[in-house]
Image (tube, helix red, strand yellow):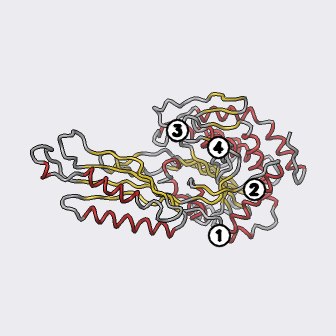
Amino acid sequence: MTTLTVNNDLEAQTLEWIATQQQVMQQDLWTLAEINSGSYNVAGVNKVADTLAQWSKKLDCELEFIDMPPQDVVDDLGQLNQKPLGRALRLFKRPQAPTQVFLCAHMDTVFPIDHPFQKITYLEDDVINGPGVADLKGGIVVMFKALEAFERSPLQDQLGWEILFNPDEEIGSPSSSKLFPAIAKRHHLGLIYEPSFADGNLAGARKGSGNFSVVTRGKAAHAGREHHLGRNAIRAMADFTRALDDLNGQQQGVTINPGFVQGGGAVNIVPDTCTMRFNIRIESSDQQAWCEAQINTILADINSRDSLTIELHGGFGRQPKQLSPANQQLCELVQSCGKSLGLSLEFLPTGGCCDGNNLAAAGLPNIDTLGVQGGKIHSQDEYMHLSSLTTRSQLSALILLRLAQADDLAWLQRDGMHRTSMEQAKC
């Protein structure tokens, strides 16, 4: 059994109380994970939001549902459509307290309503397999329990908090990310409940990411009688894709992945439309500018061809997350809390992205992997360690208690925190 080395009786009592809540947390996890909430399952995402709104009664906080604008999506035929999204849920309490903490977790998963992966099963006594158990519904349970524990303490008046449960993180937070700049201005720091790495360590620096759709349009013609009159959109897309993929290896840390292509139909017709989607990962804003310049050159070449056009949609939705001095000190605070729980936590760079990128871009230092310990996310093999519900709730509760007891948070000003009152910067 791990020996706890806490600072005072209050911390010890808080951690002991959380340890009694394991079965309650498991029941809550089952409730959330067996609600299908694929990003485009609006009813399912909203059902999760309604469930969390009910849970919020234990926190005695204020709440607000926020309608999200639809997402612009290029379909397989190259047409620009709008896809509706679920509502966001905002909870908040004590916005005028001296220390303000923002917490964030997404309600959506990558598993659509018709996906066969819908139920939780046991792999071992402490390991379960289920949709979103790690990413991110286990993290939601951890967050709620940590806040419930903090609200039981006499320190609550020293710290105010705000939660955003967003409906669209798994598709890049296209709508909810617009809320983050105002959120960043009214808080000292952010805590995000993405899962930790499989070994229990946490994410530090993150690459930035861009998602793009490309549509080529040519001219249909009979493949036998008038092949010479056609302009093949698939060939044009193949040229674009090859030139795009050839950019890999030219800038260290830049990766470009053409991930989907569709075009044409009957093989006796010269295809007049082709659609392709791709993703780019970058380590710096300079690399973003380089990628955009290279892509524009390739686009110009295709558009210069007779009776062929190519159009680009999308962009870089998440900037690289680089650890500022304030963020590094926040990492040290988390490591200190982890040490009190017998956890040796390292912060490791990753190519993955999350809402931590968006908050960092808005100037808010944040830790973005405070959720449960698990792995193989985004697959039917997704798993998590049930015991991490307790340990990670204890970790977050310690973070909140020590922030509330801190004499000086001046180090958090280094990222240019410009917190306004809740009335001045309301979502």
Mark 4 vs 3, N-terminal side = 3
Distance, label 4 to label 3, CA atoms, is 14 Å
- Mark 2 residue type: Val
Per the image, label 4 sits on a secondary structure element best described as helix
Can residue 170 be seen here? yes
Where is residue 27? Give x, y as percent. 68, 31
Q: Quadrant of residue 136?
A: top right
Residue under circle 4? 140
Quarter of the rendering occupied by the N terminus: top right
Against 97, residue 369 (above or below) is: above
- Mark 4 residue type: Ile
Q: Residue at x 17, y 48 (%)?
A: 220
Residue under circle 2? 334
Mark 1 vs 3, N-terminal side = 3
Disc 1 residue crowd, few under 14, some 14–19, many 20+, Cα 10 Å? some
Distance, label 1 to label 3, CA atoms, is 35 Å
Q: Residue at x 44, y 51 (%)?
A: 69
Q: Would you say the residues marked 1 and 2 are in contact, meaning their CB atoms lie under 8 Å apart?
A: no
Where is residue 342? Give x, y as percent. 82, 48
Mark 4 vs 1, N-terminal side = 4
Q: Nearer the viewer, mark 3 or mark 2?
A: 2
- Mark 1 residue type: Asp
Can residue 49 be seen here? no
Q: Which mark is residue 160?
A: none
Residue under circle 3? 37
Per the image, label 1 sits on a secondary structure element best described as helix
Quarter of the rendering occupied by the C terminus: bottom right
Mark 4 vs 2, N-terminal side = 4
Where is residue 11? Give x, y as percent. 85, 50
Residue under circle 1? 415
Per the image, label 3 sits on a secondary structure element best described as loop
